[in-house]
Image (cartoon, helix red, strand yellow):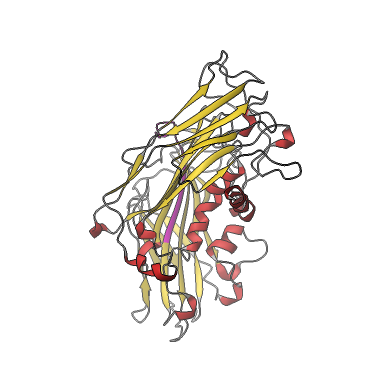
Amino acid sequence: MIAAITLCLIVAFPTLFFPAVTATLPTAQDGASPNISFRRQVSPAVLAMITSRHAIFFTNEIGAQGRLPEDVQEAPIIWYWRYVWALCHVKNNFSPYKLNWYYWIWGDWNTPELDKNYMGDCHFYVEYGAEYYGDYGGYVEMPEAKTINDQWKKGMKFNNGPDDLTQPYYWVVQPTAWDCSKVDENSPYYLSEYICRGLDPGLFSPCPDDLAGKYYSTTGFFNTTIGSTPDGRWRCGVRMELLTSAGTDVTVLSPKPSVSHSLTPKTNPWQIPETPYELRIDMKGFGIKSPALTKQSSWKRTYWWLEGNGYQAQENTGMWVDHIDPYYYQYWWSGPYNPGNVPGWCVTEYGLGCYGGAQWYVHNTYNNWWRVGPDSDLYFWPPVTPKALFPPSSVTLKYIRSNAQGILYDYGVEIGYANKGISFITAHDISFSGNPTNVRVSHPGDNVQWDLDLLGSYPDAGYD
């Protein structure tokens, strides 16, 4: 049943392209193989989590707006937000790990493969947006420029062009305007389905052509400016993608997790084809800090996973999940499978085995606005402070070693957090200016939020 649910998750949400692996098999000497591609060796189950799942949560939270449902919305209000998704590579002790982002691609945004040898630790997606919406009370024209104001680090150095690979920050996509009134069949999936929630573009009035986002190095201000807008509903903003040479921010973790493994039997070399092995992957318990209630920022949710690599196993001989601890996992994926019913996390097209792993998911009481029936009062519970602690976790997998190449296993943690800066974005909150005095602006609750994915593998990946 759980495996079926996992498969539904994979089918329902698109993942990145998953090509063949060309990697050097590790020998008895542990360490990185220079041609290992982490992103291309995790399973579709994990790719779904790290490339789309954060967006699923984001969409479920009504585009980070926290507003009333559309059928009970009252007078028109401007809702505004900031959303950040950071994907960072880490070592097994969750310290930053730099690798080459040559193969980076994000299909949901139609972001093409980078094809540049940029060495760094993180990819950041940053989005600012606003929507003017209401059921009744009358829309008004707003001829003055309106601005979403944020604070970044001062003096940030960006690349001057695609081939400038020496700067600490590299624009994959420079600040780019988006407008829900201009969505069409060629628009990126993320824009049409997540940001604009699949709504008819005809519901929105166009935002001005001078809509733009700009960073000011001297002050560190990042301003998103929306010019003159008509007397109708509109929803628009800017988005951007950038790589960092040293952008990993794990300050909310205390203690940090760490990952280790054991492989039995012990052989020399450490893995021999056609030999049965048992792999145990362990993650130490970790904690996520939240400040005092007066700060009103808090972790919202976390999930973490441990996964054995399907390329390590012969076809239909692993990786088989044997034991999962703690028992309250959310998903697991494994095998074996029946002929003609091969799950998406198996690599039988290469005559190899299946990925095997498990994921745990926990959400803060802050996130109990998922109200159902008599439990609706849970919405009023305060967040957990000052720290949430999570137990150690492990997965044991059995397999017969193949002749193929690849990493042995991968792991990761995602943290969702509200009302806090991250890395180069130093402000815990944003502000809005330029609205007429008769138009209210609002950004309650989780309108300022981020998702942080911390990913690693053994051996350490050489490419993203």
Asked which quadrant contains residue 464, the reply is top right
236 in magenta: no
74 or 138: nearer the viewer: 74
- Report whether 299 appears left or right of 43: left
- Numbered circles on residues, count: 0
Give the image location of residue 45, x and y in percent: 58, 45
Q: Residue visible at 56% across and 42% down?
A: 162
Relative vertical location of residue 350 with respect to residue 215 in this rendering, above or below? above
Q: Is residue 263 visible?
A: yes
> Nearest the camera: 15 or 317?
317
Name the foreground residue: 344 vs 336: 336
State whether residue 394 is above or below residue 225: above
Q: Is residue 367 left or right of residue 296?
A: right
Q: Give the side of residue 346 with respect to residue 425, left or right.
A: right
Furthest residue in direction right, as rendered? 340
Residue 408 point in image, percent of width and height:
56, 28
Residue 94 shown in magenta: yes
Tell me which segment is drawn in magenta.
82-97
Q: Position of residue 406 (x, y in %)?
A: 61, 28
- Residue 150 coordinates in the image, percent (x, y): 36, 58
